[in-house]
Amino acid sequence: MFQIKNLRFVFVLVVLSVYSCNNKAAQLKLEKSLLKSLKKSLSNEDIKNYYEVKINFLAEKDDNFQLFYTEDYLLSFSEKQSIRKDFKGKKEFQEIIFGLPENVFPDRFRIDLGSNKEQSFIKINTITFSYKHRAIVIPKHLISTLFVFNNQVSFNKNKKELHLTNGSIHSDKIYDPYLTCSPQLVRMLFDL
């Protein structure tokens, strides 16, 4: 009786591990296909010797974005490894560009979506990560797939826009809406 239970347990483990391996292989194949569709080659005039992040967005109120990056494969973001850019609110799309220092090769990013508590939504058209002659261009419909949002951000799939929690509702909490790279995006950036 004891051996039969052990055999069943071993059988279940083998089935789960085979399924898990097949599932991981399928996921990696899907990621490579997705990466191939998002990767772009840059023309000679667009080549930079440093890492660049561009955000094409619409925000109607004056605000700022802050880009954090790490090089240690940890989620330890700090002000020392960040760039902050202010922008004027507009009713049309605009672009903000973050140029990282030379010889910095980030593995993870966090994008803080401003400090203006009256900014209720932001539409992001694309987020582009580029280095030298290669770029990954993430379109709006994949933002919710390739980024993880904190609890102050939600994604409206119909309107393809990020909704920000109004800071006045949560006055006891720090207003800090942000998104970070999903594990899938981290792997894709590694191949950039």
Image: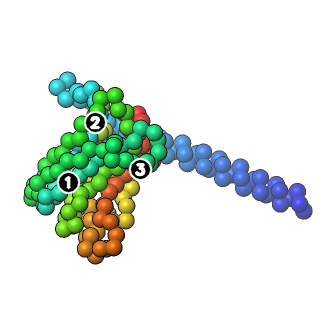
Q: Residue 100 bears which disc, if any?
A: 2
Quarter where residue 71 is shown: top left
Q: CA distance from mark 2 to mark 3?
A: 20 Å
Q: Nearer the viewer, residue 17 or 48?
A: 48
Q: Is residue 141 left or right of residue 60?
A: right
Instruction: Residue lying at the far top in this picture: please name it.
Output: 44
Give me the residue at 39% from left, 48% from top: 77
On screen, residue 142 above or below 120:
above
The residue where tag 3 is placed is 182
Indicate which label's residue lies in the foreground, 2 or 3: 2
Which residue sits at x=44%, y=48%? 75
Question: What amino acid does circle 2 point to?
Answer: Leu
Mark number displayed over residue 11: none
Q: Quadrant of residue 179?
A: bottom left
Query: How crowded is the residue under tag 1: few (<14 C-alpha within 10 Å), some, or many (20+)?
Result: some
Residue drawn 65% across and 47% down?
18
Q: Residue furthest front?
A: 80
Q: Earlier in the sequence, mark 2 or mark 3?
A: 2
Q: Residue at x 13, y 49 (%)?
A: 94
Disc 2 secondary structure class: loop
In terms of secondary structure, where does tag 3 sit?
A: loop
Whether tag 2 and tag 3 are in contact, CB under 8 A, the answer is: no
Q: State how far apart marks 1 and 3 are (Cα).
A: 22 Å
Q: Is residue 141 visible?
A: no
Asked which secondary structure carries label 1, the reply is strand
The residue under label 3 is which amino acid type?
Ser
Relative to the observer, which residue lies in front, 127 or 39?
Answer: 127
Marker disc for residue 64: 1
